[in-house]
Amino acid sequence: MQNKILIANRGEIALRIIRACKEIGIPCVAVYSKADHDSLHVKFADEAICVGENYSKDSYLNINRIISAALSTGCNAIHPGYGFLSENEKFASIVEKCNIKFIGPSSEVIAKIGNKSMARKIAKEAGIPVVEGSDGIVNTAQEGVKIANRIGYPVLIKASSGGGGKGIRIVRNETEFVTLFEQTKFEAEANFGDPAVYIEKFVENPRHIEIQILADSFGNVIHLGERDCSVQRRNQKMIEESPSPFVDEALREKMGSASVALAKAIGYENAGTMEFIVDKSGNYYFIEMNTRIQVEHPVTEMVTGIDIVKEQIKIAYQNEMTYKQEDIKLNGHSIECRINAEDTTHQFRPSPGLIQNVVFPGGNGVRLDTHIYNGYFVPPYYDSMVAKLIVHAATRREAIKKMRCALETFIIDGISTNIEYQYLIMHNPDFVKGTYNTGFIRKFTALIEGERNE
Ligand code: ADP
């Protein structure tokens, strides 16, 4: 049987996967919703198949339709990208039962480590520090209050099946605990189909640092260094960079080895990311693992020279990794800005619509991963990210300057975007010095809103 890959995603990541397939020489099939009929991934894949209506639940999240698309086009593998069904154990398990290779870990591994409260337990057992909190799921508010009183406020109530920064609530005192507990459970059920929640101590203004790992089916596991993703709005990442301005060689080695050990302990295969929060003193705590390609993978590709998506495909087709840990060197510095169709002057509300004119930045060390073009209509049904602008330079300072130039020459007319907002961040002293943490955007937004009102 000839190898053929179905790409169960849309937007820039679908294009990213198409490129990897073409470079390796494996034909690929795109799926699309009616709203995405004119998308580039539909045009650039070798074949394309419509899987339903505009809303994700009727198309990209419809397991039966995606599987039928794969079977009817003769695909022997499915790349899930990120979001949608990428971390859905039921989907992965049906894919396996249909004798199709899921490009990611096994459904069994997703079931274990994809569940955030269970992942904490596994990490703890593997000797990796986790934030103080509950031992597993907390069933009642009364039980939760006891735990919160023991570890001290503020605490976070987190949905076990949550993701994308959603399903997390901060509780500052006992009075508000019961209401917020019930609200989080209700939202968790509504958004993720699972009401289970757990509790973690809220660490004030930590850094979010994550380790990229690659693991093949021969038991080889390596890490590709870290990404700093501390520039976040409402727990969602906006800017990522590698290496982290905070991490030295010793900390990288400690966090990298811990991540490799955890991947080995769970029999992980394919690309994955261990996420940690790190406090001012450099103490790191595991918070979760993402069992898929991440939005921010390009910064790691730029500094390591490794094409992570091509590696994912090679690993899935049972090839042994050609890289050893000692081959991995971080070269220079890379920064990614997520470009979103949103109005930063009105609470970042989404700004879908027709793109009337676009001018893309370019030049040495500039990479743009995007699916937009002149005349493209940004549909209102999906995530608002329309591009990822990535730069690579010898030093962090040069990378910041390159990003400023690239943002200056990036024009998207017709919709509102956060290009100017990102440009302002590139001039903020805390960002430029590299001393920022996850509290950065709150401070920064207050600063520029203050200026606007003057
Ligand atoms: P998701 O799966 O939705 O991405 P995470 O558990 O990874 O959720 O957390 C998202 C973000 O929330 C983190 O990057 C961090 O900024 C913040 N966060 C998570 N846990 C804690 C914690 N215990 N203390 C402080 N901030 C946290």
Image: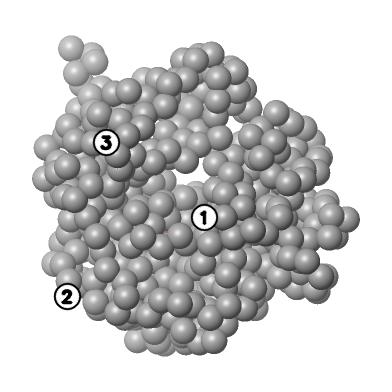
Q: Nearer the viewer, residue 300 or 361?
A: 361
Distance between the alpha carbons at the discs numbered 3 and 2: 28 Å
Distance between the alpha carbons at the discs numbered 3 and 1: 28 Å
Vertical comparison of 260 with 421: above or below: below
Vertical comparison of 373 with 160: above or below: above
Q: Which residue is mark 2?
A: 250
Q: Which mark is residue 403?
A: 3
Report the residue at 32% width, 75% height from top. Answer: 327
Res. 363 visible in picture: yes
Report the residue at 57% width, 55% height from top. Answer: 23
Q: Do the residues bearing badges 3 and 2 touch, measured as CB atoms within 8 Å? A: no
- Amino acid type at circle 1 is Gly
Q: Quadrant of the N terminus?
A: bottom right
Q: Secondary structure at mark 1?
A: strand
- Residue 395 screen position, x and y as percent: 16, 50
- Residue 78 screen position, x and y as percent: 70, 61
Of labels 3 and 2, earlier in sequence is 2
- Amino acid type at circle 3 is Met
- Residue 370 screen position, x and y as percent: 50, 36
Front: mark 3 or 2: 3
Of labels 3 and 1, earlier in sequence is 1
Q: Secondary structure at mark 3?
A: helix
Q: Residues within 10 Å of mark 2 (few under 14, many from 20)?
A: few
Report the residue at 36% width, 60% height from top. Answer: 305
Q: Residues within 10 Å of mark 1 (few under 14, many from 20)?
A: many
Left/right of residue 218 with respect to residue 176 in the rendered view:
right
Report the residue at 27% width, 36% height from top. Answer: 403
Q: Residues within 10 Å of mark 3 (few under 14, many from 20)?
A: many
Q: Secondary structure at mark 2?
A: helix
Q: Is mark 1 within 8 Å of ligand 1?
A: yes
- Amino acid type at circle 2 is Ala
Distance between the alpha carbons at the discs numbered 1 and 2: 30 Å
